Image (tube, helix red, strand yellow):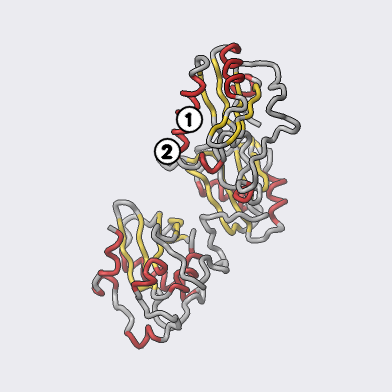
């Protein structure tokens, strides 16, 4: 239970700073105020096995002073609660400002482990206060790669490469500001792609030129700038991405694969349950016109232009079934959107070559 942090005794946390000292911390609100509690806590993931609460508190207090992020004398971290079974901890700071500044330690190495710092789930920004640190602590590689013109996508990585091995490859071009190897949440295995950003933006193009197309084992790397503002693109009207295609237009020579457009928005595919529901709906609807062999709905990957994202591909047993579905579904309304269809090349479909 993560809510018990505030009621911890001082014995578990070492000495709690005296009231006089706390008054000097320069924050408008009383130190340890319940009002700001969720804005003064940080989740720390990937902690070293068997680490104690004292060790965590000492480490962060030392780092805060070393990086000149402590806003007053005394210790910024008041308390820590460790969950050893699940390998995470919560830190409680004396002030909202210092909590935000401590986010700059996301990715810091502690006893050989790269720590993951996040806001807690119940975090509510405090009005008038910054939500993200505007500093970079030298030598710390953040685990969150923010969207920016310098964010790099690295695809085609062999799945057996771990964080350190991929980092090593990237570090040969310069110091990293942020790095994230994307992993399957259920198995913790690499999904074969990563994002990074260099401390020096001038390194970006050199790294892309040096790494793109590089042969690693039986794979070739795809390294490019991650499409900037993939999030912004979602707020624009749906682009059908097929110039000159009209609803009444020709869907191309019939094949057994039908591409359905304007039915889903990329953000609807982010949620696991919503994604499964959409898959089920499509199978059921298309199954009315013939035998459906498979359905593919490319899902969005944060910061990457995923080919075919926002489209639905349905493979039928025969061209005839596919034609029936095409005639029935074209122009139909789905969630207030008019469905657009076209036939798709089966070879491309089987190669997962979506566009």
Vertical comparison of 255 with 302: above or below: above
Residue shown at 57% from the left, 56% from the top: 178
Determine which quarter of the picture holds residue 351. Answer: top right
The residue lying toward the viewer, choosing from 52 and 345, is: 345
Locate the C terminus and report the quarter of the image it occupies: top right
Query: Disc 1 vs disc 2: Cβ atoms closer than 8 Å?
Result: no
Q: Is disc 2 placed on a helix, strand or loop? A: helix
From the viewer's perspective, tell me whether residue 165 is left or right of residue 199: left
Q: Is disc 1 placed on a helix, strand or loop? A: helix
From the viewer's perspective, tell me whether residue 355 is left or right of residue 115: right
Residue shown at 50% from the left, 75% from the top: 69
From the viewer's perspective, tell me whether residue 97 is left or right of residue 222: left
Dot 1 surroundings within 10 Å: few (below 14), some, or many (20 or more)?
Answer: some
Q: Position of residue 22 (x, y in %)?
A: 37, 83
Vertical comparison of 243 with 256: above or below: below
Q: Position of residue 152 (x, y in %)?
A: 64, 49
- Label whose residue precedes the other's in the sequence (1 or 2): 2
Most distant residue in the bottom direction = 20
Which label was assigned to residue 210? none
Locate the N terminus and report the quarter of the image it occupies: bottom left
Residue ID for mark 1? 279
Which label was assigned to residue 273? 2
From the viewer's perspective, tell me whether residue 42 is left or right of residue 181: left
Q: CA distance from mark 1 to mark 2?
A: 10 Å
Q: Position of residue 250 (x, y in %)?
A: 71, 21
Residue shown at 72% from the left, 24% from the top: 249
């Amino acid at each position: 239970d993560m809510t018990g942090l505030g009621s911890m005794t001082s014995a578990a946390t070492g000495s709690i700073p005296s009231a006089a000292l706390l008054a000097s911390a320069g924050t408008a609100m009383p130190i340890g105020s319940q009002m700001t509690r969720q804005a003064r806590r940080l989740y720390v993931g990937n902690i070293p096995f068997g680490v104690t609460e004292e060790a965590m508190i000492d480490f962060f207090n030392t780092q805060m002073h070393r990086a000149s992020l402590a806003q007053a004398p005394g210790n910024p971290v008041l308390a820590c609660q460790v969950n050893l079974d699940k390998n995470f901890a919560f830190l409680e700071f004396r002030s909202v400002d210092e909590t935000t500044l401590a986010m700059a330690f996301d990715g810091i190495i502690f006893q050989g482990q790269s720590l993951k710092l996040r806001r807690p789930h119940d975090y509510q920004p405090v009005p008038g206060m910054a939500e993200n640190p505007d500093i970079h602590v030298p030598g710390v590689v953040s685990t969150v790669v923010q969207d920016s013109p310098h964010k790099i996508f690295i695809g085609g990585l062999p799945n057996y490469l771990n964080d350190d091995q991929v980092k090593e490859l990237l570090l040969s071009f310069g110091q990293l500001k942020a790095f994230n190897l994307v992993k399957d949440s259920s198995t913790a295995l690499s999904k074969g792609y990563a994002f990074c950003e260099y401390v020096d933006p001038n390194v970006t193009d050199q790294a892309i030129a040096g790494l793109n197309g590089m042969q690693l084992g039986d794979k070739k790397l795809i390294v490019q700038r991650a499409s900037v503002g993939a999030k912004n693109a979602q707020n624009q009207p749906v682009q059908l991405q097929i110039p000159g295609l009209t609803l009444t237009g020709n869907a191309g020579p019939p094949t057994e694969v039908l591409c359905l457009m304007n039915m889903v928005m990329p953000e609807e595919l982010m949620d696991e349950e919503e994604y499964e529901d959409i898959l089920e709906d499509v199978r059921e609807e298309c199954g009315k016109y013939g035998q459906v062999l498979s359905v593919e709905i490319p899902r969005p990957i944060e910061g990457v232009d995923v080919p075919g994202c926002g489209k639905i591909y349905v493979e039928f047993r025969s061209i005839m079934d596919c034609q029936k579905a095409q005639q029935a579904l074209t122009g139909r309304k789905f969630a207030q959107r008019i469905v657009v269809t076209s036939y798709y090349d089966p070879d491309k479909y089987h190669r997962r070559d979506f566009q």
